[in-house]
Image: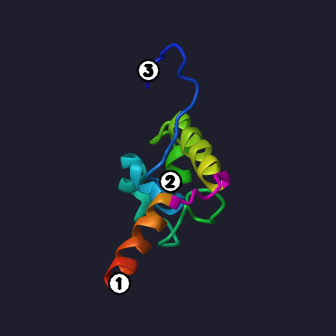
């Protein structure tokens, strides 16, 4: 990450909350040992990622960043692309004419 003047936020446009965990390679390396296959590494019991953080195998700051990103993604509102919707309707109207 760079310290750039005017840069005050990071947008994770192409990431969903369920896929965020896969963007942290050190999480992927131990996640197979989590009790639950879909573990998000937040509140689930017997989470191997949280255990690795507690053992010092994963940096606490990386886990904190993950938690912050996850919270931001969960709070984001859906964005509807009206232009795409119009584009998808237009060809059908032309085909019917």
Q: CA distance from mark 2 to mark 3?
A: 27 Å
* Residue under label 2: 49
Q: Earlier in the sequence, mark 2 or mark 1?
A: 2
Residue 93 at x, y = what percent?
40, 79
Above or below — where is 59 with respect to 86? above
Q: Quadrant of residue 96?
A: bottom left
* Residue under label 1: 97
Above or below — where is 28 with respect to 59? below
Q: Earlier in the sequence, mark 2 or mark 3?
A: 3
Q: Earlier in the sequence, mark 3 or mark 1?
A: 3
**Dot 1: what SS?**
loop
Residue 64 at x, y = what percent?
59, 39
Residue with the most extreme bottom position: 96
Q: Quadrant of residue 33?
A: bottom left
Quadrant where the image shows the C terminus: bottom left
**Dot 2: what SS?**
helix
* C-beta proximity under 8 Å, tags 2 and 1: no
Residue closest to the eye, 73 or 80: 80
Query: Is 16 displayed left or right of 88 in the figure?
Result: right
Q: Nearer the viewer, mark 2 or mark 1?
A: 1
* Residue under label 3: 2
Q: Residue at x 54, y 58 (%)?
A: 17
Quadrant where the image shows the N terminus: top left
Residue closest to the eye, 9 or 71: 9
Q: Nearer the viewer, mark 2 or mark 3?
A: 3
* Residue stretch rendered in magenta on the structure: 75-82
Residue 31 at x, y = what percent?
43, 60
């Amino acid at each position: 990450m760079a310290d750039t003047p005017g840069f005050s936020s990071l947008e994770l446009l192409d990431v969903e909350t369920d896929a965020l965990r896969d963007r942290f390679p050190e999480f992927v390396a131990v996640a197979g040992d989590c009790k639950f296959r879909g573990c998000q590494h937040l509140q689930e019991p017997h989470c191997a990622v949280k255990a690795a953080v507690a053992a010092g195998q994963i940096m606490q700051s990386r886990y904190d960043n993950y938690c912050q990103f996850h919270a931001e993604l969960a709070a984001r509102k859906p964005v509807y692309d009206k232009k795409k919707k119009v584009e998808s309707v237009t060809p059908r109207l032309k085909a019917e004419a």
